[in-house]
Image (spheres, rainbow, N blue to C red):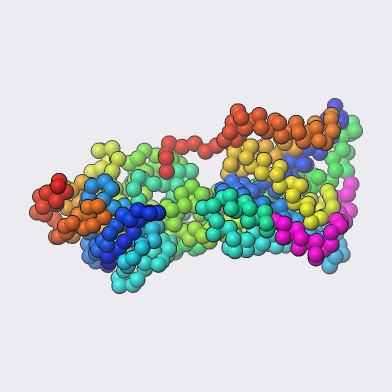
Amino acid sequence: MLDIKTIQAGYERTTVLHGVTVSVPKDGVAAVLGHNGAGKSTLLRAAMGLLKPGSGAVLLDGEDITRLAPHQRVARGMAYVPQGQQSFPHLTTAENLQLVADGRLGVRPRRSGSGRGKESIAEALDLFPALRELSGRRAGLLSGGQRQQLAIARALITRPRLLLLDEPTEGIQPSVVAEIEETILALTRRGGLSVLLVEQHVGFAMRAAQRYYVLEAGRVTSSGEGGTKSEQTVRAALSV
Amino acid sequence: MTVILNQSFTGISIGAVLLLIALGLTLTFGQMGVINMAHGEFIMAGAYTTYVLQKSISSAGVSLLVALPVAFLVAGAMGALLEWLLIRRLYTRPLDTLLVTWGVSLMLQQLARDVFGAPNVQTHAPDLLTGNISLGGGITLANNRLFILGLALLCVLGLTLILRLTPLGRRVRAVVQNRDLAEVSGIATERVDRTTFFIGSGLAGVAGVALTLVGPIGPTMGTNYIVDAFLVVVVGGIGQLKGSVITAFVLGVLQSVLEYSTTVSVAKVAVLVAIVAFLQWRPQGLYTLRTRSLA
């Protein structure tokens, strides 16, 4: 589905990623684990096109998308939930979702029928029913957990084939963490969606993933099959 | 008392002109953070558009009505072109934008001199707008100033509705609030920038049409208003439509009433001192956005 090939990227004068190769299997989950500052978020930013790589390539279903702008990647079926429960704070919850469903000028929701993307909004709200009652409230006034649910719902409006998730449960109250994790697992098991998951929680990542990569100081130091049986290997790799 | 009321009405109409000019700036300066010194020349473009149209359409009323949308398109297209040619390359360098657009402003002024000549030109106001409405007790409202007031309020209403209710408005607000997130949500942010610039510049063109009703048309007419319009946006609170509306009218009335009791220069100084004092007290302007989120 997604192939990131020996990518080199960074900011200003510092290189963060030194030739990282990661691939996401079709309809599967690949997890990227690592300590703070290892380059996990940078890898997702490069994959999404927010960061221009110095060298290397990003392939989506074999198509070279390295030079495409982020919104063009969205049009090709990618979606991205960045770190930190980001939202459009002065737009209401409903507007945050409608904005993406509007299509035109940007991307037209794929396979969308009539009604200005009403179906895809309803679908996303079915995953997070709590958002329904908050539709008139500004996103900036939501709690962290609610904002993260909104962020995931917003990413799903375009009905992506590939979802990039950056630490989806980080900084969220424990009561909501389990709920978000269950939703993500359900999404990946439904089929038709591949996920590149950046996580610090080894347990959850290994439960969700078919493949894992451990990133250390901008390099992949170990990788292998996902699943709970690899959990100890990964914990060992991370504790060094 | 009568005099003060009449002066206040004049002030309100000055405020209406300021508001028309500042509306465009709340978009390009307030929302996008671009200090566009050529904004005044888009006003001039709108005014000359009215002049040219009146030469080909004899009826002053018809030509004025035609001029409003045409001036919007002409000035808007100039703005979009400027954004595409220069400004989009300078979004990360605000001070360079100021210099570049100032240069563009001087070039456009010279272009106007070459095409239309250095002396000011004049349009004829339609008969309907030349008279006065008398409210009794010596209070009179000039028709042309009422028209400008109505036009300004209509533009505020239109812009508010577009920003609040349309997909384009949602996109504009989204890009302002979180550019990267908008881009990764599938919004072509560069195209939104250009559209925003088109609308902001177009509104300056409409302001230019309004100005032909109250004064002569000349190559430097835009520069007379541009500083005041920037002040309106800053005092109102950057990017805040509501703040710009209130500030424009307050500044207009203040200027006009002070002018009557003193002289033009003293009034100008007094208004500037008042603004400086106000910004010392509230540097963020009249209105600001507040939320819990840091993003």
> How many numbered callouts?
0
Residue B242 visible in the current orientation? no
Residue B53, above or below B256: below
In the image, A15 versus B122, the foreground residue is A15
Residue B295, x across and y down, in percent = 42, 43
What span is in magenta? Answer: B105-131
Residue A111 is a magenta residue: no
Left or right: B214 in relation to B192: right
> Residue B183: x percent and y percent?
44, 57
Quadrant placement of the N terminus of chain A: bottom left
Q: Would you identify the image quadrant in which residue A230 lies?
A: bottom left
Magenta stretch holds residue B123: yes
| Residue drawn where x is 42% and y is 40% of the image | B294
Q: Is residue B18 above or below residue B46?
A: above
In this rendering, would A123 be left or right of B251? left
In the picture, residue B265 is in which quadrant? top right
Instruction: Single out the residue that lies furthest toward the bottom.
Output: A62
The residue located at (89%, 53%) in the rendering is B127
| Rendering coords of residue A138 (x, y %) | 45, 41
Q: Is residue B140 above or below residue A186?
A: above
Image quarter of residue B241: top right
Q: Residue at x 35, y 45 (%)?
A: A84
Among all residues in the image, which is located at the extreme front? A13
Q: Position of residue B5 (x, y in %)?
A: 82, 32
Q: Residue at x 67, y 37 (%)?
A: B246
Q: Is residue A102 visible?
A: yes
Task: Judge from the rendering whether residue B114 lies leftward or rightward of residue B288; answer left or right.
Answer: right
